[in-house]
Image (spheres, rainbow, N blue to C red):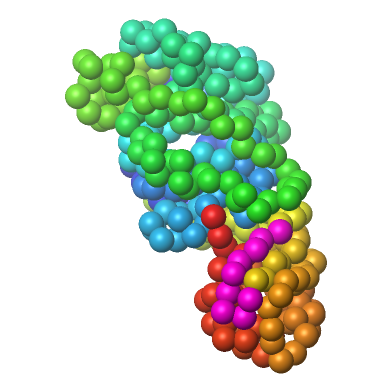
Amino acid sequence: MRYVINNCTDAHWNMAHDEFLLEGLSGDAVFCLWQNAPAVIIGLNQSAYAEVNLPYLEANGINLARRVTGGGAVYHDLGNLNYSIAGPAREVENYYDLMADALRRLGLPAERTGRNDIMVNGLKCSGWAKRLSKDRMMIHGTLMWDVDFEALTEALAVPGSKLSAAGIASVRSRVRNLRPLLPQFKTLEEFRNALHNILADGSPEICLTDTRKAQITQRAKEKFGTWEWIYGRSPKTEFECTRKLPCGTVTAHYTLTHGVFSELEFTGDFIGNCPASELSATLIGKRLEEVISQPVQDFFEGVTPQEFLSIFLQR
């Protein structure tokens, strides 16, 4: 199979690159093996606020990106190898088993199960999603080589305060790294090269021109790296969060729709000089991160903007 070399580790650029493989190429199938620096990638139909531990991501410099395919949220780091396969939609059935077949050739008892998982000895090592565009199909997925499971667990911690969320909820599975099962490969690079050779099978590389790369960079900047794409596509999500603050106990009942407050009410035994309903009214239509800029002292006595924000961003 023809292939494209991609050594970029920026999640937003790589999402744009995947879209290019799907929509910008024609002809026979092509594959690409690639990696991301630490990032969480959410599905096309998911809420960023309901599926991801946003404070943990911010504190640890983990990027958040949204892909063009459905399915659940996944964690990537440099211990993870990703793959993308795009080609004529009429050949799509061939793509489903391609990676499991390649892993079996490396000596693993890999099998495709369920909708989109690859299992080894009953534990998940890969999950994939797909997208159709006109007469072309793309599948892309993960291969966990030596992923930091502690970071994965923290980054994908679902808010306990979530009441409901439209869209697709992530399904957590028991997962495993492949590194202990493939002792013949000392590094991920060795594993990547072996996998590449199996998939390429002597086929030629597709070299992207500087113009093509510039177009992908522009797409990453104008679409995949924007608030509107990452957060603004989030479907309606309802929350109820309680925090004990200097003013008393505050419970926020709120709904985020496409990343902005559509409903907000405060209840509790807190004290303040002005009705909290006045603050609620000013926040309707604003983004969650705009909470930090609000003058909250009049409504919640002795509370700083950062403490006020903590009501909404808690785990």
Q: Is residue 246 magenta?
A: yes
- Residue at left offset 41%, top offset 7%: 109
In front of the other: 273 or 176: 273
Residue occupying the point 50% across, 18% down: 118
Quadrant of image for the C terminus: bottom right
Answer with left or right where residue 274 lies relative to residue 204. Answer: right
Q: Quadrant of residue 49?
A: bottom right
Which of the two residues, 8 or 210, is positioned nearer the viewer here?
A: 8
What residue span does the magenta drawing correspond to?
240-248
Q: Position of residue 199 (x, y in %)?
A: 40, 18
Q: Position of residue 253 (x, y in %)?
A: 75, 64
Asked whether residue 48 appears in the rendered view, the answer is yes
Asked if residue 203 lies left or right of residue 142, the reply is left
| x and y, in percent, of residue 307 in the image | 54, 75
- In the rendered image, the vertical position of residue 229 relative to residue 279, given as above or below: above
Residue lying at 65% horizontally and 83% vertically, measured from the top left: 300
x, y (%) of residue 61? 39, 58
Residue placed at 19% from the left, 24% from the top? 186
Q: Is residue 213 visible?
A: no
Image quarter in which the N terminus is found: top left
Image height of 270 relative to 272, above or below: above
Q: Is residue 211 left or right of residue 46?
A: left
